[in-house]
Image (spheres, helix red, strand yellow):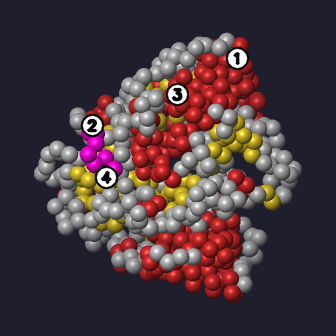
Amino acid sequence: MSPPFGKLHPRISGGQHRPPFSIESPDAPQIPGETKPRRNSKLAGKPGLLSTPNEKIQTAYDVVNWAAETYGGKRAFGTRNHGEPEGQQFAYTTYLEYQTLVRETGSGLRALGLNKADKVLIYAATSPQWLAVAHGCSSQSIVFVTAYEALGLAGLEHSLESTGAKAIFVDRSLSAKVKSVLTTKAPEVQAVFFNEPPAGALATDSRWRDDLLELKQLRPQLNVLSFTELLEAGRRQPIEPVPPGREDLCAIYYTSGSTGIPKGVLVKQKAVVAAIAGLDSVIGNYLSPKDSFLAYLPLAHVLEFAFENSCLFWGVTMGYSSARTLFDYKAPSGILREGDLRAFQPTFLIGVPAIWERIKKAIISKINAAGLVARTAFWTWLSAKDTWIASGLPGIDSLDVNIFGAAGEVVGSRLRFAMSGGGPVAESTQHFLSMVVAPLINGYGLTETMAMGGLMDPQEWHTGSLGSIPASIEMKLVDYPEAGYLCSNPTPQGEIWIRGDSVTEGYYDNPEDTKSAIKSDGWLCTGDIGQWEPNGHFKIIDRKKNLVKTLNGEYIALEKLESVYRAATLVANICIHASPHRARPIAIVIPSPPALEQLAIQHGLDPKSKTSLFTQRPGIVSDALQQLKQVAKSANLSSIEVVEGVGLTTAVGKLNRRAIMARYQTRVDQIDGTG
């Protein structure tokens, strides 16, 4: 299938895309130690920031109704039956059907005894049901509360007890945690309704049935039912919607808790629609009902929730996936199955840096396995394409199809552009994928800003830049003198502050953190360090919490280094550690299994042995360190940014700096030489 509008090519400017890409906010005063606030240049001559994508959309529930009225019988989203022996095609739900699903969900919640302003905790993986519960809550002015799948018992207990949630929507795989908490805690919870995967889905632990049965025995008054039963209750007792207003609370989005007890960010209805307006102001011109988006990132993160609501606004068809089935995978039977990327063939995709590194490495592996002529053509065209685009020479699409076509199959062959978020992606990876597959744009935002902060226009593409400011916010920099980041520097630098309707007004039941993060005039202090570029773009150069002063008194930025070292062939994920007691950083690396096995073979080891045996071999550790040093050299890192030691671990999951340090302190001390 061919892309709906033809392929996009990364370029710093073209057509009407001319710098400056941001302008100073009109009538803003010049405050010492600050830059003047800046906003999207598309707002020139307009009275203020955008607050909604159109006047008919004032709340999240309005998005559902507007989409149903506008797109009707068009496909809204699809899900895939991964358990079928063959076929495994996506099955779709229309926009009108989704509107009905939302209303039945809302009525079902009311049938459980919930009313306006009551709270429902969503503790589940990304799925259409997750989104329907969120919108069903909004249809009745009920507030939903989020919890990451990976949230531990303490965080789950805190989320339930602090908010007084009266119902929980939970995945079957998480039932044991819910049972554990509800056995002695959260007496306000009146109902638990669980998600049901499609018939024939990948096998999961059947223990959930026992968990729910035991929970019912422990708390007989608790209403335990399935999502299907909730919908049936809504059909039996249809209740007219109780639509919220713009100023009503939509959700409490809990942060991931990587630095301690998670904080509940208050998300008003106006923040959701302002975020849609902000996204639309930057990339809306590139998306239409002909496009498709693969959803797999956690809806418990505001970025995914903002984008899925925006897809409803744009009429984009969504396909639901998971990290487990995104790429080709082995079914329980042992059969290799086509991953969702290749099956769904999205035209737009969001991913975190680790996903883009995985895709890049898969493409390079595929090219290295090709013949000499194909390999030579690939690398020759890659080195020439930058100049070709800048010169406006013809034939780029034809050359891409003939030379890069096979590489594009890794992501389904229809990708027109993609976005990286959740941390900095290595510039070399961004450039590679932008040239070989499609423009990879950067995005930046926080839970507190409903993911608004920076978003690159594909036609204002530049590696390392965060691009434009969405038109629903304005931004300024404030001096951070401790590290020498000053607005008076030749290139203005400082802490990023953000203001607009998408910015939270505070944290739930947490006045102390609210006061420290949010100023009385609405400015949010992000803790991130940025700088303005001459063309009006901005970039993140550091984070206050991740700046570490080394033994020689110089600061290094941990996330910047992680984005660089993640490009090493051996690295699946990495955590950089620095200390004021040492001159240079060290690394804790989760190795890529194929790359680790290849190293094992080179050292005369059986690749089928336990990988934990490989990670302790001095020769393999030495080779890993040399790989990292070579990447550092290629990226022109300074001498104090080059790691002096590395530890390998077979741990899986998200690398959380605080958890890594707690778990591997002894290993870190040994690597660091301080133990």
Residue type marked 4: Ser
4 or 1: tag closer to the N-terminus: 4
Residue 323 showing in the rendered view: yes
Question: How far apart are labels 4 and 1 at the CA level?
Answer: 48 Å
The residue that disc 3 covers is 61
4 or 3: tag closer to the N-terminus: 4
Residue type marked 3: Tyr
Mark 1, Cα crowd under 10 Å, few <14 / some 14-19 / many 20+, is some
The residue that disc 1 covers is 235
Residue 648 occupies quadrant: bottom right
x, y percent for residue 294:
62, 50
Between 579 and 141, the one nearer to me in the picture: 141
Question: How far apart are labels 1 and 3 at the CA level?
Answer: 19 Å
Task: Tell me which segment is drawn in magenta.
Answer: 40-48
Residue 211 occupies quadrant: top right
Residue type marked 2: Gly
2 or 3: tag closer to the N-terminus: 3
x, y percent for residue 130:
61, 34
The residue that disc 2 covers is 522
Q: Which residue is pictured at 31% across the width and 30% down the height? A: 511
Mark 3, Cα crowd under 10 Å, few <14 / some 14-19 / many 20+, is many
Vertical arrangement, residue 578 with respect to residue 42, above or below: below
Mark 4, Cα crowd under 10 Å, few <14 / some 14-19 / many 20+, is some
Vertical arrangement, residue 15 with respect to residue 311, above or below: below
Residue 588 showing in the rendered view: no
1 or 3: tag closer to the N-terminus: 3
Instruction: Classify the position of the N terminus by image quarter.
Output: bottom right
